[in-house]
Amino acid sequence: MLKFEKRENIPLHLRILIPLISILLGVLIGGIAVMFSQVNPLTVYKAIFIGAFGSTYVFSETIVVAIPLLLISVGLILVFKMNYWNIGAYGQYIMGAIFCTYFALNSAETMSRPILLMMMCIAGMVGGALWALIPAALKAYWKVNEVITTLLLNYIALYILKFLMYGPWRNPRSFGFPLTKIFDLNAQLPKLISHTRIHLGLIFGIIAAIIIWIIIKKTKFGYEIRVIGENEIAARYAGINIAKNIILAMIISGGLAGLAGMAQISGIIHMLQIEINPDYGYTAIIVAWLSGLNALTAMIVSFFLGGLFAGASQIQITMKVPIGIVGLIESSILFFLLGGAILTNYKLYYKGRKII
Amino acid sequence: MRPDAYAITIILLAATVESGTILLFPIIGEIFTERSGILNLGIEGMMIIGALVGFATAFMTGQIYWAFFMGMLAGGLASLIHAFISITLRGNQVVSGLALSIFGLGVTNFYGQEFVNLQLAHTIPQVIIPGLSQIPFFGPILFKQDYMVYLSYILVIITWFILFKTKAGIQLRAVGQNAQAADAMGVNVYKVRYFWTFFGGLMAGAGGAYLTLNCAPFWLDGITAGRGWVAIALVIFARWNPPYALIGAYLFGAINALQFQLQSMGTTIPSALLSMQPYFLTFILIIVATLLVKAKHIGVPKELGIPYAREEK
């Protein structure tokens, strides 16, 4: 019979192999799903690959998607490390976009470009952080389940955005469409590379990943977070202020999600509208988990999932393959990764013989 | 009360019951899943799978009750993914549940494409109960509904009975409170958890199917619109007790029916703010419920979210 025995140390080869095998199996499941709709999965995957990495331009589009994924996921890593949950990046992202739009619409003429962009970044972070502070405080002081509150706040944020776009912020010259006016050049994040849409947000993302990595590995705050994540009761006995850490981690996480929202509308969309891709907030959860809660690994994973998304967006147009394929593949990868964790946590014996 | 105001109240409350029934099924299901110690955040995913399978079956066969059953079954099958990962493989239940929701939304977007904007010719037929429907005020609200609504009434009573008055209920609660002790008593922890997780999936599928077979008889991407998350919040509001689930579900149903009514009457309140209300109400409810649960020491199932590993005794 199968028997499990707890592992003390996780061997490095398993730590690398399991995510890789999970990705392969997830892609396989996606392929089977595609077969059911009478499309050749090899054709689809080839098209996704070419659509993600096949030319300089699509390659740059992959990076464009990776930017918000990276910014959001490294913030989530901080919260997840603590074994707390922020499922509200979707709403925090929207709030960041809304807050920074206020400055883009009202201060574009009075501020110079660097000052305005700085104000927009700060506003974006404040918007996201405030939206994360609500569930964080509710969790820290009243123990209200943060999974549910962050999720519900996503819907509330979405309707606030809709209210603004169908009401006070709708551009009177947009022929009734729920759009603001196009941002002045002053309010647009500068491009990093010409002839692409890659913007300054990429630098924000890389800096954020490095800072989060340093916070977790090298600071007292990071140490406390890891202790809470491993054993909350022990952390409490050790005198660690759990409420303070929850709030701080959530504010940072929300702030980064808000910054991602700001970067997306200031760097890519150049106006506020209803469709501003807040779903990145959910995909970033997968990035965080797939990277093993390591902020530096999140850079690679963001790029990979960015490619999947960019490639799938292409085939949605060219081959009429619905975009849901992305969620299908992503969730399948997650299932295998979660299931595979048993092999990293346990040694497996079959009839007394060690298999793995 | 003017007669037309009376009539509108009746219509509103009847709509409340209908809209609440969508949630009542999944709330009851999740109560049992959580009571067994398994947290399944995949309700949104299982509901939308049930919604699409129910809709597609009804669209292709015209058999509305068969469609309801198929939607329910699809939700149950989807829950087995979560059961396998969290019970057998002891994986992280929070992430697995979220993955199940992402899976449901993705898979229904993928396979639902050909049904977008199609409508059902017939919804679940109204079945007026003779006698009971004649009761003034309550009759037309509660007993001019359909079989699924009546099923939900019965379900509340039966599940309450199972939970508190039967051996299965005792075993279920024991597993959720202290799996090791339950195991020592000879209860098969894994079997109990598999069974009630599957039941939770069936109920989520039923809720989803009821949505597309009755309340919104068409197919749109993401049609469940967060009701699965609301259901999870209302489980806490219900304090893991089926009769209270009724209150939570109908409160949500009421505010949903009211905002619809206001929108169709052409109110000046912006529609985005009206549509927000059900989520806002749930947000307030979860805070209040948490404080109440804490004050009265009615705890969550103690082993909620903790995997059980038998050989580590």
Image (cartoon, coloured by chain):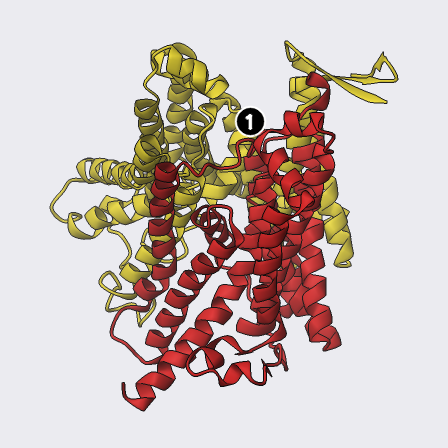
Q: Residues within 10 Å of mark 1 (few under 14, many from 20)?
A: many
The front one of B13 and B262 is: B13
Q: Would residue A161 be seen by someone viewing this image from the given angle?
A: yes
Q: Which residue is denoted by mark 1 in the rendering?
A: A291
Picture quadrant of residue B212: bottom right
Q: Specify whether B313 is left or right of B248.
A: right
The colour of chain A is yellow
Residue furthest to the left in view is: A110
- Can you give x and y, in whole percent of width and height, for residue B311 in the image? 73, 19
Residue at image location 55% in from the left, 34% down from the top? B304
Classify residue B35 by image quadrant: top right
Percent across and percent down for residue A222 are 39, 16
Q: Residue at x 48, y 80 (%)?
A: B139
Q: Which chain is tinted red?
A: B
Q: Is residue A158 visible?
A: no
Q: Residue at x 62, y 81 (%)?
A: B125
Q: Position of residue A262 (x, y in %)?
A: 32, 42
Q: Chain of mark 1?
A: A
Residue B27: x, y in percent?
A: 53, 53
Pick the residue in front: A246 or B129.
Answer: B129
Residue A2's place in the image compared with B172, above or below, is above
What secondary structure is found at the residue carrying circle 1? loop
- Identify the amino acid type marked 1: Ser
Q: Quadrant of the N terminus of chain B?
A: bottom left
**Which residue extends farthest front?**
B165
Quadrant (top left, top right, bottom left, bottom right) of the C terminus of chain B: top right
User: Is B267 above or below relative to A105?
Assistant: below
Q: B18 above or below A123?
A: below
Instruction: Name which quarter of the figure residue A354 lies in.
Output: top right
Q: Residue furthest bottom?
A: B3
